[in-house]
């Protein structure tokens, strides 16, 4: 396997290098080569969003990204949300509002919500529905998930949604 | 994941000339991959036939939107997020902005490109009906130079197009002369996001003195590829819009539409819905009255 040339990119603020087939999916590289198993595989065809990560500030389905196309990119996964042992406000809100049940869709939901809030700090319910439309949940129910996103953006929160520098 | 990453070569030359040289040197050997929203699905399912792939992602020469007074040119590598974010497209080519907004979801729109949507050639392609009624032109590039063809002549059959083996889709040119015309676009699918069209119909039209002077109808999923409904258009040209002419147009569409039964819908349903969409558009047009 080491015959492959190095592919370098940044994940959650850390420079990483892998030597894998360039057509290996970013999702599999994250999970198998980098040990970041937060991103899940649901459908493997861009329908369910459970593999959602952010790449150069855009939301992508990591199952549809050949790792070569991540060369030089900044990738943020769910593991990059909490900082200094403190949960991201979205994670706290999901916890408080019951926005996660089985948890399979949750990393993708969190990343899609992070993406939404990065471009729209106070989304309406319609905007939340659109922002999360590519993320399927089959047990929690969407209402609690949408409510979690609203809770994370509520004016009375002490911490604002702050993006780590590497995710911009 | 049933595909085997080791079974496919993928290179990223990083600039347009190198890609074109590769396509010229080994025509039909290399499959361009842009945002991968089609190719990677096939890859994961283990049904990606292409052994050699050349990445177009990150080639800035392909990812641009240029607005001039009379036209907007969109690079083949522009994503649907790029299209949605462009103010000129939203105002002057609203049907295209609308179509871009209902392609998949945000994560798909961040990666899927206009060029990829067209080259993939799905009969249900979301951007196609809008491009058809805006008289889009396709610019193809190869080491031999550039050439332009009308988008209405681009698709030649199911998943077939007019590109030669050494050519790459470079850009889509859109004249802005439709900005003042009546616009219509409606997609019928199973839900608002992530749904592949059962049927979609786009239209632009210009009425003068109560008569239809210009009308363009573009449809998805009514034929093996996205197409203009020319016979239905002809049935409307020069006529006043009333119950009789609308019925004639629907009869023309009934003949012209050749939808199929597949996993998403039936031919009969598609035809019925297409007629309903056409009726909706023409009725609104008749009610709104004259003018551009």
Image (spheres, coloured by chain):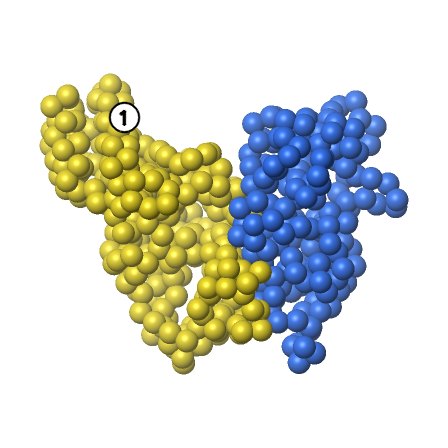
Chain A representation colour: blue
| Rendered location of residue B85, percent (x, y) | 52, 41
Tag 1's secondary structure? Answer: helix
Would you call the spot at circle 1 few (<14 residues within 10 Å), some (14-19), or many (20 or more)? some
Please say if B128 is above or below B283.
below
User: Does residue B141 appear to the left or right of A9 in the view shown?
Assistant: left
Q: In this orientation, which residue lies closer to the viewer: B270 or B129? A: B270
The residue at 44%/76% (across/down) is: B22
Q: Position of residue A65 (x, y in %)?
A: 58, 58
Q: Is residue B237 left or right of residue B132?
A: left
Determine if residue A25 is in view.
yes
Q: Chain of mark 1?
A: B
Chain displayed in yellow: B
Looking at the picture, tell me which residue is in the foreground, A134 or A126: A134
- The image quadrant of residue B95 is top left
Residue lying at the far top of the rendered structure: B287
User: Which residue is nearer to you in this view: B140 or A90?
Assistant: A90
Q: Residue at x 23, y 27 (%)?
A: B279
What residue appears at the point 28 percent right and 35 percent down from the top-left corner?
Answer: B269
Provide the residue designation for mark 1: B280
Quadrant in the picture for the N terminus of chain A: bottom right
User: In the figure, B283 relative to A47: above or below?
Assistant: above
């Amino acid at each position: 396997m080491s015959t492959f040339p190095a592919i370098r990119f940044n994940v959650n603020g850390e420079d990483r290098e892998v030597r894998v087939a360039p057509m290996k999916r970013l999702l599999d590289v994250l999970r198998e080569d980098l040990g970041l198993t937060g991103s899940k595989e649901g459908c493997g065809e861009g329908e369910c969003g459970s593999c959602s990560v952010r790449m150069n500030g855009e939301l992508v389905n990591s199952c549809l990204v050949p790792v070569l196309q991540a060369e030089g990119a900044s990738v943020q996964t769910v593991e990059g949300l909490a900082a200094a042992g403190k949960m991201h406000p979205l994670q706290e809100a999901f916890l408080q509002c019951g926005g996660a049940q089985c948890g399979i869709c949750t990393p993708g939901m969190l990343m899609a919500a992070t993406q939404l809030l990065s471009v729209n700090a106070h989304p309406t319910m319609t905007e939340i529905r659109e922002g999360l439309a590519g993320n399927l949940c089959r047990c929690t129910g969407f209402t609690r998930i949408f409510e979690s996103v609203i809770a994370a953006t509520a004016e009375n929160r002490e911490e604002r949604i702050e993006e780590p520098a590497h995710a911009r | 994941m049933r595909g085997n990453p080791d079974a496919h070569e993928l290179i990223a030359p990083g600039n347009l000339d190198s890609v074109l040289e590769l396509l010229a040197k080994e025509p039909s050997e290399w499959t361009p991959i842009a945002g991968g929203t089609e190719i990677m699905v096939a890859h994961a399912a283990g049904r990606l036939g292409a052994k050699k792939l050349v990445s177009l992602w990150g080639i800035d020469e392909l990812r641009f939107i240029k607005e001039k007074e009379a036209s907007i040119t969109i690079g083949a590598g522009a994503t649907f997020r790029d299209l949605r974010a462009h103010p000129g497209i939203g105002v002057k080519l609203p049907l295209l902005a609308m179509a871009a907004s209902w392609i998949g979801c945000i994560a798909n729109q961040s990666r899927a490109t206009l060029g990829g949507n067209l080259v993939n050639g799905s009969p249900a392609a979301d951007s196609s009906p809008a491009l058809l009624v805006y008289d889009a032109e396709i610019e193809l590039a190869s080491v031999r130079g550039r050439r332009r063809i009308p988008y209405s002549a681009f698709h030649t059959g199911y998943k077939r197009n007019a590109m030669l083996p050494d050519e790459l889709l470079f850009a889509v040119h859109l004249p802005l002369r439709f900005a003042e015309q009546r616009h219509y676009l409606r997609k019928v699918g199973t839900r608002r996001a992530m749904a592949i069209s059962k049927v979609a119909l786009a239209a632009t039209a210009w009425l003068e003195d109560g008569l239809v002077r210009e009308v363009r109808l573009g449809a998805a999923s009514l034929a093996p590829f996205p197409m203009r409904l020319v016979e239905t258009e002809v049935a409307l040209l020069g006529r006043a819009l009333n119950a009789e002419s609308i019925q004639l147009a629907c009869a023309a569409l009934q003949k012209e539409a050749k939808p199929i039964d597949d996993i998403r819908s039936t031919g009969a349903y598609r035809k019925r819905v297409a007629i309903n969409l056409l009726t909706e558009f023409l009725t609104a047009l008749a009610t709104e009255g004259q003018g551009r």
